[in-house]
Image: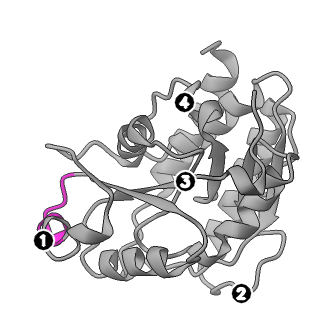
Amino acid sequence: MEKAGVEKVRTLSVVVPCFNELRTIEKALRALHASDPGLPLEVIVVDDCSTDGTRELLQGSLRPLVQQLLLHDKNRGKGAALQTGFAQAAGDFIIVQDADLEYDPREFRKLLQPMLDDRADVVYGSRFVGGDSHRVLYYWHSVGNRILTLVSNMFTNINLTDMETCYKLFRAEILKSIKLREQRFGFEPEVTAKVAKIPGIRIYEVGVSYYGRTYAEGKKINWRDGVRAIYCIIKYWWLKD
């Protein structure tokens, strides 16, 4: 597998799954383009059948900010949106960026560095090992995240601190070699289990900032997704593909 040095980075593909994000999508896209002028980005937005005007905004005034706009004809879930985006990504590296700006795209360079130094193939941005600032929100959410990470680590035998993080950065050839199945938030444990099974894979974590939002502000994940995550951890540890 050819490794990329700093001078060889052509494009970072940023896949943005989007469902009913009218309040934040414009801010998110402008933040992406302003994040690092020296880093070439391919912004791929997958609209998962938004019904609040997000799709119309993306097809209208925001269209120049999106290199690829992919549309689902029915709501299929975050995992399905990511699969659609990953399949079309053309960059050397691929990262996930939620449309709600809970994570700061100005930290892309920090996440990329272990790969550019030829030390990593996959980099997770951890909310629990540093970063500049973190919004104080739900205690039980943080407990749940840590429990899911612990259970995932027990099955995968890797020592992540934040399996559920949005910021997962992959060498494109690594991600495209993985067959993904999960349609909703089960993507996080599924991709972690499948990455951990790749022989010789080099996984790193980098501390990132986190600006979480409340349910009133549009947060969508709930306790049922946590239960599904446990199921996915066990399922994809057991399955061979």
Image spot of residue 9 (x, y percent)? 65, 53
**To which residue does mark 1 refer?**
60
Whether the residues at callouts 1 and 3 have beta carbons within 8 Å, the answer is: no
Residue at disc 2, secondary structure:
loop
The quadrant of the image that shows the N terminus is: top right
What amino acid type is highlighted by mark number 1?
Answer: Gly
Q: Specify few, some or many for label 2: CA neighbours under 10 Å numbering under 14, 14-19, or 20 or more.
A: few
**Image side of residue 186 versus residue 217, left or right:** right
Q: Secondary structure at mark 4?
A: helix
CA–CA distance between discs 4 and 2? Answer: 32 Å
Using the numbered discs, state the Cα–Cα distance from disc 2 to disc 1 in whole angstroms: 34 Å
Residue at horizontal 28%, vertical 60%?
A: 19
Nearer the observer: mark 3 or 2; the answer is: 3
Q: Are marks 4 and 3 in contact (CB under 8 Å)?
A: no
- Residue indicated by mark 3: 11
| Structural crowding at the residue carrying mark 3, measured as other residues with C-alpha within 10 Å and reported as few (<14), some (14–19) or many (≥20) | some
- The x and y percentages for residue 200 are 86, 26
Type of amino acid at the residue the image marks with label 2: Ser
Residue 76 counted in the magenta span? no
The answer to whether 114 is drawn above or below residue 52 in the figure is above
* Earlier residue among tags 2 and 1: 1
Q: How is the image coloured?
A: one colour
Measured Cα–Cα span from mark 1 to mark 3:
25 Å
The magenta segment is 49-57
Q: Which residue is mark 4?
A: 176
Pointer 1 or 3: first along the chain:
3
- The mark that comes first in sequence, 4 or 2, is 2
Residue at the spot 38% in from the left edge and 39% down from the top edge: 88
Task: Identify the image quadrant of the C terminus.
Answer: top right
Residue carrying label 2? 133
> Please, what is the three-letter code of the amino acid marked with disc 3?
Thr
